[in-house]
Amino acid sequence: MITDIFFDLDHTLWDFDKNSELAFETILKESHPTININEFIEQYIPINQACWKLYQNDKISHIELRYNRLKHTFDALNYEISDKLIDEMSEEYIRILPDNNNLFDGAIEVLEYLKDKYKLHIITNGFADVQNRKITNSNIGSYFQTITNSEMAGVKKPNPIIFEYALNVANSKKENSIMIGDCLDADIQGALNAGIDAIFFNEKNVEAQQNIKQINHLLELKKYL
């Protein structure tokens, strides 16, 4: 019997790609107007995902993550830019990113549907200050009883320790909990390895094992919960 639902934040409830594009559009128009925003985003998205995977597995630091994803994108565009300007752009991006508050379609509706039936929580690998601002600015904080981030737990998903930490904070049991997220490695396999059931938010329709519960739209959670 499920009593507690743990959500990932970025790419699951909070539309990271859309909000990220808006942040970069603001920055590039002001500081690098010759760069085509669509070309920049096309390069940035897979580079950012690759950098985050390295970060989740402790292969790079958060400082390297923030620098590398921009440096590699500019390199792919053959755009000359100094390390100083990359660092300044990285800081500006983090500052204005949470000002955008687009959620995935159905996010509020499904949270409203779930809130009276279950205790809702968040587990995120994002940086605490930035994630808290995203949650506040998108007006979803009131739905969640606990918010666990990797800075608090000292480890990142898929490490089972962060799931154990979140369970303790939520005062819940793994057999009564379920994890919902967009990342097969960090969210889904991480939760399953920790003994927690999981539902894969497969918004991009990537190939996944048939035995994994999955949805393509958040409102499909009503079929499971």
Image (tube, rainbow, N blue to C red):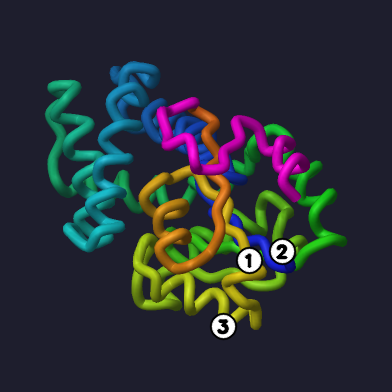
Q: Residue at x 59, y 81 (%)?
A: 169
Comparing labels 3 and 1, the label whose residue is closer to the camera: 1
Residue at mark 3 to residue at mark 2: CA–CA distance: 16 Å
Residue 145 is a magenta residue: no
Q: Which residue is mark 1?
A: 177
Q: Which residue is mark 2?
A: 2
Indicate the quadrant containing the N terminus: top left, top right, bottom left or bottom right: bottom right
Comparing labels 3 and 2, the label whose residue is closer to the camera: 2
Viewer-nearest residue: 34 or 193: 193
Label 3 crowd (10 A; few <14 / some 14-19 / many >=20): few
**Circle 2 sits in a helix, a strand or a loop, which is it?**
loop
**Circle 3 sits in a helix, a strand or a loop, which is it?**
helix
For the residue marked with disc 1, what is the amino acid?
A: Ser
| Residue bounds of the magenta highlight | 205-225
Q: Position of residue 139 (x, y in %)?
A: 73, 53
Residue at mark 3 to residue at mark 1: CA–CA distance: 12 Å
Q: Which residue is mark 3?
A: 168
Q: Earlier in the sequence, mark 3 or mark 1?
A: 3
Residue 221 is a magenta residue: yes
Q: Position of residue 20 (x, y in %)?
A: 46, 37
Mark 2 touches mark 1? (CB < 8 Å): yes
Viewer-nearest residue: 156 or 75: 156
Q: Position of residue 100 (x, y in %)?
A: 59, 42
Q: Earlier in the sequence, mark 2 or mark 1?
A: 2
For the residue marked with disc 2, what is the amino acid?
A: Ile
Q: Residue at x 49, y 27 (%)?
A: 204
Residue at mark 2 to residue at mark 1: CA–CA distance: 5 Å
**Circle 1 sits in a helix, a strand or a loop, which is it?**
strand
